[in-house]
Image (spheres, helix red, strand yellow):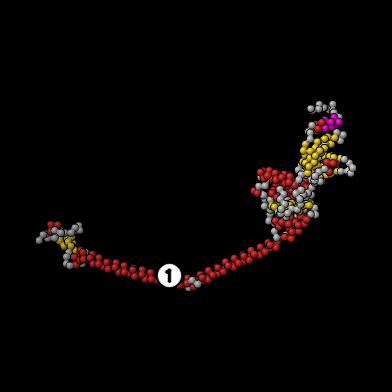
Amino acid sequence: MALETSADKPVPVRTVARLIGQWISRLGRVWVEGQITQINRRPGQPTVFLTLRDPDADVSLQVTCRAQLLDAAAVPIGEGQRVVMFARPEFFVPRGQLSLVAEQIRPLGVGELLARIEQLRRMLHAEGVFDPARKKRPPFLPGLVGLICGRGSAAERDVLDNARRRWPAVRFRVEAVAVQGPYAVTEIRKALAALDRDPEVDVIVIARGGGSVEDLLPFSDEALIRAVAACVTPVVSAIGHEQDNPLLDYVADVRASTPTDAAKRIVPDVGEEQRRVADLRARLRRSLTNRLDREQALLDALRHRPVLARPNALVDRLEHQIDELIRAARRCLTHQLDRASDELRHNLARVQALSPQATLGRGYAVVQRADGAVVRQPEQAPAGTELLVRLAEGKLAAESRGPA
């Protein structure tokens, strides 16, 4: 029931604390999973104080339990261990503090941890977090490499030494974090976000040496997996050894079996690249030499062809052909002219033979009246008609005396 309060009728702190305690007590006993980050145990005291933390949400609760409860555990319980406990929520009114009173504590075994990781893997796979289509390809030669690793760890030395041995000019931005324990996930996520925001970082490497399943558990944390999936910068996973397979390997853009392998994947080998360039130069030189040899051989073959060896031969042959054609055309034209001349003389002879002038030349004459009409009958020239007699050579004027 909500309290009826106002500025004129406030309730004291003890009343609010008491009501909160009553509401919390109604929750009853619950099973809680978390990671023990701190154990405060004083010698001779029957009560042990624990800090139970949720690494995904960065939330912690104080837990009290009997010392015999920890001593009776089949597996020793220590800091950094994941446990499941059956506890009763309790609100301490004088201090206004919420805590849990544990009645049972069970450490999570390796088999159970692996089963939980496998269940999480299937869920993330169904969501498409591990889809190969979303993976990004790291650049061939990154300008700046972000490295997330333990402070002064062997993984850091392996990555730095091998990368610089392969490409001495490579630059690193190293973020030292806790790579195991209760604060590992939080620190790795913060370092990952910082490197992903840096525009100069071209690729991010998360590296750690080998370890037990419990040691590598932070790299299968759901919050870290989703943070890596949301990164814009390509991420390389280099966790443990070849047989280790945390969920980070599935979501990372590139999986390296070891930190040393990660160094080989993020930068090229300068010696190998120089050899490759030398090989390519040699192949290019051979290819160019072969091409020049082929072209020279083709040029030599062309130069030895008759058309190039004796360039005037074609002109001489064509000139001879032209002379022959000219002579043939002249002969043809002369023949045609001769034929035309003979035909013309023949036609002229025929015309002359049929010409009235030729008739006149044989002694005949043509008689015409003054109007130019030819007289063919005597009746056409009565007596006294002036006539014109056309001879073979010249003309005579005459006068008709009538028919004879």
Residue 319: say if magenta: no
The amino acid type, in three-letter code, at marker 1 is Leu
Q: Residue at x 58, y 67 (%)?
A: 290
Residue 23 visible? yes
Residue 194 visible? no
Residue closest to the eye, 6 or 204: 204
Residue 313 screen position, x and y as percent? 45, 72
- Could you tell whether 118 is left or right of 47 in the image? left
Instruction: Give the position of the N terminus as an image quadrant.
Output: top right
Q: Residue at x 16, y 67 (%)?
A: 363
Magenta stretch, main secondary structure, is helix
Is disc 1 placed on a helix, strand or loop?
A: helix
Residue closest to the eye, 345 or 75: 75
Residue 5 screen position, x and y as percent? 82, 27
Residue 14: say if magenta: yes
Q: Residue at x 33, y 69 (%)?
A: 334
Q: Quadrant of residue 49?
A: top right
Q: Quadrant of residue 88?
A: top right
Residue at the outermost right position: 44
Q: Quadrant of residue 70?
A: top right
Residue 83 screen position, x and y as percent? 78, 43
- Could you tell whether 238 is left or right of 6 in the image? left
Q: Residue at x 86, y 43 (%)?
A: 40
Residue 355 screen position, x and y as percent? 21, 64
**Residue interval drawn in magenta:** 13-21
Residue that badge 1 annotates: 318
Residue closest to the eye, 8 or 262: 262
Instruction: Give the position of the C terminus as an image quadrant.
Output: bottom left
* Vertical comparison of 16 with 384: above or below: above
* Vertical comparison of 312 with 252: above or below: below
